[in-house]
Amino acid sequence: MTPLIKQKPVVINVGLAAFADNLRQCGGEVQTLQWQPPAEGDVTAGWALAQLLAHPRVEEANRIAYSRYLAAQPVLSGVSTAAQVLPGMTEKRILHSGPPIEWARMCGPQQGAVLGAILFEGWAPSLEDARKLVEAGAVELSPCHHHGAVGPMAGIISPSMPVWIVRNAAGENVAYCNLNEGLGKVLRFGANSEEVVQRLRWMAQTLGPTLATLVEEIGGIELKPLMAQALHMGDEVHNRNAAASALLFRKLTVAALASTRLDARAVSESLAFIASNDHFFLNLSMAACKVMLDAAHGVPHASMVTVMARNGVDFGIRLSGLDQWFVAPAAIIDGLFFPGFGTEDAARDLGDSAITETAGVGGFAMAASPAIVQFIGGTPRDAVANTRRMLHITLGQNGAFTLPALDFTGTPAGIDARRVLDTGIQPVINTGIAHKDAGVGQIGAGITHAPLACFSQAIEALAATLPAPQ
Amino acid sequence: MTPLIKQKPVVINVGLAAFADNLRQCGGEVQTLQWQPPAEGDVTAGWALAQLLAHPRVEEANRIAYSRYLAAQPVLSGVSTAAQVLPGMTEKRILHSGPPIEWARMCGPQQGAVLGAILFEGWAPSLEDARKLVEAGAVELSPCHHHGAVGPMAGIISPSMPVWIVRNAAGENVAYCNLNEGLGKVLRFGANSEEVVQRLRWMAQTLGPTLATLVEEIGGIELKPLMAQALHMGDEVHNRNAAASALLFRKLTVAALASTRLDARAVSESLAFIASNDHFFLNLSMAACKVMLDAAHGVPHASMVTVMARNGVDFGIRLSGLDQWFVAPAAIIDGLFFPGFGTEDAARDLGDSAITETAGVGGFAMAASPAIVQFIGGTPRDAVANTRRMLHITLGQNGAFTLPALDFTGTPAGIDARRVLDTGIQPVINTGIAHKDAGVGQIGAGITHAPLACFSQAIEALAATLPAPQ
């Protein structure tokens, strides 16, 4: 007979290290587990969390919200201008990424992009005049998210810009996103030179109308299967869109070949522009994610996160059950910088593109995209670990977006703010890095995390909507 | 003090199980390792192998052959007809896949495809007359590989067919492959109806000349970077070519948009045809692999494998150091069948496409392509295991083809016939499965292995070229 237990017992201490002092003094052997209290030890948030965890109303609300997210069917159904289709788009309004922010607090790239948009709209003849116009309060600034829209990085949408229109075929809601300008000097990274403004004009005059006709000829493109296919081709449809862009290009080209209504030069220029940009699909991915999450928004008491967005100063989240923002300072991003740049040059976390992570793709689907690490840093193993870690904070796995590297299980989706606060596991986000000054452009890419402070505020606010516990 | 060894010693028996009988009789504990002698216990092949293993001439020859393979730079440099560019292409010659085979022994799909090619060429007015023509010996049949060419499945190339021309920019050699016809009823699976022949005529009259102009306008396409990119997008460039086909389509379209020399209808038809076929790149991948391996061919005493090919009856390999085929019966393939079909309907292993595995991609690069298992069976874990296993039989890893799932290490490449025979590890091949009868088409896809008998013959023949050991 061999004894099953060959070692002297060791006590495992879960909680404050001081709990074990007595035991140690009596000669006991203690192993201290790395531990921290839920809600980062914030007592108010902790009590709110305790009230919400396993609360039947929250559970039921999340079930409804999450099933609406799963059921959503994003269909690219058109291209128009912001002025024509965006709800609440007044004559002199410019939309920006992230939670609400006034002009004076905006980060460099976002200010630069607002000024560029004013030049593009012809509201001012020079950057200087444009700045005066904003400072005089003559331009209304509001978040894309308040108008059913999203925009990457600075996220600027002005009335004359063309936008993708993505409808939820399984519901009533619609989402919008601007068109991707390509790389280099572009408005979304705060560049506003003549070259940038000229490109925006061409996009409004040529690209937008051409795409509008092509989408009409195709009769709409279902985006979920296209994104799912791209996930099987190494994209995570946030920072890597190489496959999705190539597949979209092919669909548009086939439609262009069959069409008799289009101007040959406009088609030729438009297709060449799309072909040159492996990120072209990003803005469509964002609109698709927005439409899926808007479907889940507005279920009272639901703790499911429906928005994560940054304006380069603040990071904001929204819950399905509450119509308000919960903000905390935007993070500095740890990433790979282009030669000659470093952390000290970087703007803080910026853009609405974290809508992809909120919808279970992007950083949440990194396991699908081992090659992404060449762009944002880390190893393929880290990419898989990031996806796996997100399983602890999500309501389920989305079977429409399967991950080959995880045996075709669905991507973790539907962030539950309660679980984030309870576990301290922050949602992971893949992102580009903008220079902090307007006009310089992208200087790197990396991984960042949603700040926990947003989640503790949200949980406290959500708890306040429920009757006090007996 | 705790003793390091807590267990009573156990003897591990490597070799015949009978070796351990004595020990067991004396009360010893024996663990028998699963073991079989090299060369499957074939004494002649085993002696030949012993002579070649670590032989300095073979080592040096392999070093040269393998470095020529690594250095090769396949460039798509044109499209022409087989009659115009293939060496030794006489007026009434039809090329087929695999090692040499006479008409009477050919499998159903290959016979069907030969007859279809005769109709396409106009050498006979009906299938019946075409058969009489071949049986009368009026058509010369020879392997693609004897003419610097490769062809998937039946691998039929007749004089008027358009072929890809792929040059080795780092050498003098050139390789050729026919163009992919798409899925459904196609010649390469033995179909030869009017629809099939009509498509071949359109390919010769429209697709071929259009592609010739486009490739000319582009000025050649480097195929190694394109294949490497596709490996980062879930292709293994044998049975999965979704990414490579989409990327090639984009390149050709951009050239077409810029060209003024092309007929609009021909361009439109050609691009639509290419867009509809996710396997379109396969034939280019094969030509690229052929050119890389031909660069390594012809180094005396080298045991590096430069060809693996099947004609549906025989499986044949060739070594760099010897100008002859070593054949064994082609295997029945274990795979996933389309509904209504099973193993009993399947033709044996068929096609020159195993040139991809010979060059280190296809089955050897399965780790790049977890989604391939949905097509050929198994799990993503199996896909990675297949790639890892091939490291035991290859001369190195090709740094030009990196695998994200294996931390961006190169794909196992340069099969050493000695190691195959020594370890018993058979080269893995991803493949389509044809119906055994002509004209039915593809009925599935799966994984197969090169038969060891080819390798024992090759090793015996190679040993015979070296002076007898002292």
Image (cartoon, coloured by chain):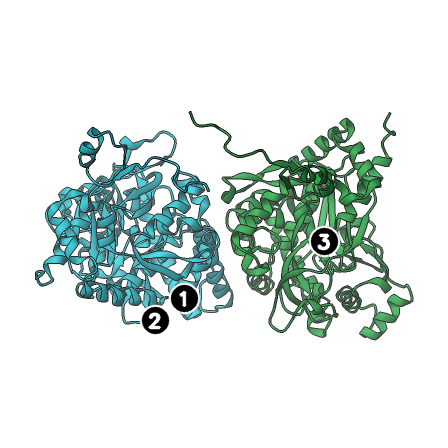
Chain colours: A cyan, B green
Q: Please name whichever residue, A93 or A198, is drawn nearer the observer in this view of the structure.
A: A93
Q: Please name whichever residue, A117 or B120, is drawn nearer the observer in this view of the structure.
A: B120
Mark 1 to mark 2 CA distance (whole Å): 9 Å
Task: Tell me the quarter of the picture where residue A64 sits.
Answer: bottom left
Q: Please name whichever residue, B42 or A323, is drawn nearer the observer in this view of the structure.
A: B42
For image coordinates 43% across by 39% down, the residue present is: A379
Mark 3 to mark 1 CA distance (whole Å): 37 Å
Residue A167 in percent (x, y) is at 32, 67
Contact (Cβ within 8 Å) of mark 3 with mark 1: no
The amino acid at mark 1 is Glu
Mark 3 to mark 2 CA distance (whole Å): 46 Å
Q: Which mark is residue A222?
A: 1
Mark 1 secondary-structure assignment: strand
The amino acid at mark 2 is Ala
Q: Which residue does the numbered mark 3 point to in the structure image?
A: B352
> Which quadrant would the C terminus of chain A be assigned to in this image?
bottom left
- In the image, taking residue B139 as reference, residue B455 lies left or right, namely left
Q: Chain of mark 2?
A: A
The amino acid at mark 3 is Asp
Contact (Cβ within 8 Å) of mark 1 with mark 2: yes
